[in-house]
Image: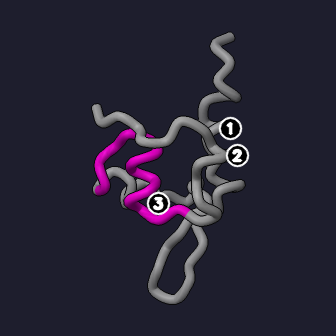
C-alpha cells in the first residue's frame, strides 16, 4: 500500500487530477483512473482532462467512509 503524501484536506489544491487522487488515497495511479471513471465518483471534465473538485472529493470520502465513524 502506498502512503498518502497529504496530511490534511486543507493541503489539497482546488482540483485534483488522477495523480493527486492516487497520492491522496495512497493508491496506484491506475486505480485512481479506474475510480475516476466510476459513476459515483465526482469528476468534472475540462476539455480532455478529468479533475475532481476538492470539496466534492472530501464529500465523497466522508460518504464512502461514513464520516470515518466505525459504528
Q: Residue furthest top?
A: 71
Quadrant position of the N terminus in the picture: top left
Task: Please say if the residues under marks 1 and 2 sit with CB atoms less than 8 Å apart.
Answer: yes
What residue would you read off at disc 1?
A: 63
Q: Is residue 1 left or right of residue 8?
A: left
Q: Depth check: 65 or 53 in front?
A: 53
User: Which residue sits at x=64%, y=24%?
Assistant: 68
Q: Which residue is mark 2?
A: 59
Q: Calculate the distance from the C-alpha at mark 1 to the C-alpha at mark 2.
A: 6 Å
Secondary structure at badge 3 equals helix
Residue, disc 3: 36
Q: CA distance from mark 1 to mark 3?
A: 16 Å
Q: Say if 12 sits above or below 50 in the image.
A: above
Say if the magenta span includes residue 17. Answer: yes
- Which residue is at a point 31% across and 55% down the rendered structure image? 29
State whether the magenta stretch is mostly helix, strand or loop. Answer: helix
Label 3, label 2: how far apart the Cα atoms are:
15 Å
Q: Secondary structure at mark 1?
A: helix
Q: Quadrant of residue 25?
A: top left
User: The magenta stretch spans which residues?
Assistant: 16-29
Q: On the rendered image, what quadrant is the C terminus found in?
A: top right
Mark toward the start of the polypeptide (1 vs 3): 3
Q: Nearer the viewer, residue 22 or 70?
A: 22
Does the magenta segment cover residue 23?
A: yes
In the rendered structure, which disc, 3 or 2, sits on the residue that comes first in sequence?
A: 3
Q: Residues within 10 Å of mark 1 (few under 14, many from 20)?
A: few
Amino acid at each position: 500500500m502506498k502512503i498518502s503524501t497529504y496530511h490534511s484536506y486543507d493541503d489539497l489544491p482546488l482540483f485534483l487530477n488522477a495523480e493527486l487522487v492516487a497520492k491522496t488515497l495512497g493508491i496506484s495511479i491506475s486505480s485512481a483512473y479506474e475510480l475516476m471513471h466510476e459513476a459515483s465518483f465526482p469528476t468534472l471534465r475540462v476539455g480532455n482532462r478529468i479533475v475532481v473538485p476538492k470539496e466534492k472529493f472530501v464529500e465523497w470520502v466522508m460518504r464512502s467512509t461514513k464520516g470515518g465513524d466505525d459504528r
